Image: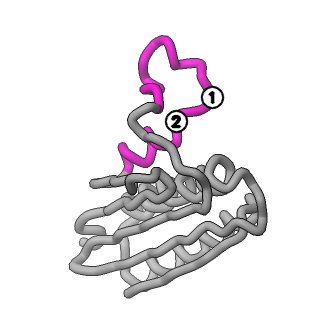
Amino acid sequence: MYKRLKVESKTASLRIIENAIDEMTGAIGINQDNYGKILVATLEAVNNAIKHGNREIPEKLVDVIIEYKDNDLIITVTDQGDGFDPKRIPDPTLPANIEELSGRGVFLMTKLSDEITFNEKGNSVTMSFKEVTD
């Protein structure tokens, strides 16, 4: 099963992505625990792409690919921004960063997915969720 969406860089586009996740996970029969992890991680990735990657310029699109194969769900989110180096994001769990408001999204995505990779440019993230159905 495969679904690809291109959405405008507007916060309202998150609803389109949420509906696509609901549709796909419902069709596959993903359990509630996995559904929550997938939804939060995906919305975080898309929100980051909209706000930080495309700087909320509606004409810039966010490309979202949702693919289910071999009982794994793979989600790729790509923006049209300049990219970033994920290794340079401070650890939000360190005492010095506890009160910082930014930097939690990538941390959440990393904790919620089974595997996460960024492309070299840093404008695309692929998250894998393993064995998502019972």
Q: Quadrant of the N terminus?
A: bottom left
Viewer-side residue, 98 vs 80: 80
Q: CA distance from mark 2 to mark 1?
A: 7 Å
Q: Is residue 1 magenta?
A: no
Callout count? 2
- Residue 103 location in percent, x, y? 53, 33
Would residue 4 be found to the left or right of residue 29 on screen?
right
Q: Which mark is residue 50?
A: none
- Residue 4 location in percent, x, y? 51, 81
Based on the displayed image, in which of its 4 quarters is residue 133 positioned? bottom left
Q: Secondary structure at mark 2?
A: helix
- Three-letter code for the amino acid on which mark 1 is drawn: Leu
Based on the displayed image, in which of its 4 quarters is residue 33 positioned? bottom left
**Circle 2 sits on which residue?**
104
Residue occupying image coordinates x 34% and y 71%: 73
Q: Which residues are magenta?
A: 89-112
Residue occupying image coordinates x 48% and y 83%: 3
**Circle 1 sits on which residue?**
101
Viewer-side residue, 46 vs 86: 86
Q: Mark 2 and 1 residues: CB-CB less than 8 Å, in contact?
A: yes
Q: Secondary structure at mark 1?
A: loop
Would residue 134 be found to the left or right of residue 116 on screen?
left
Would residue 107 be found to the left or right of residue 44 on screen?
left
Residue 47 in view here: no
Residue occupying image coordinates x 43% and y 57%: 125
- Residue 132 location in percent, x, y? 29, 68
Q: Residue furthest top?
A: 96
- Three-letter code for the amino acid on which mark 2 is drawn: Arg
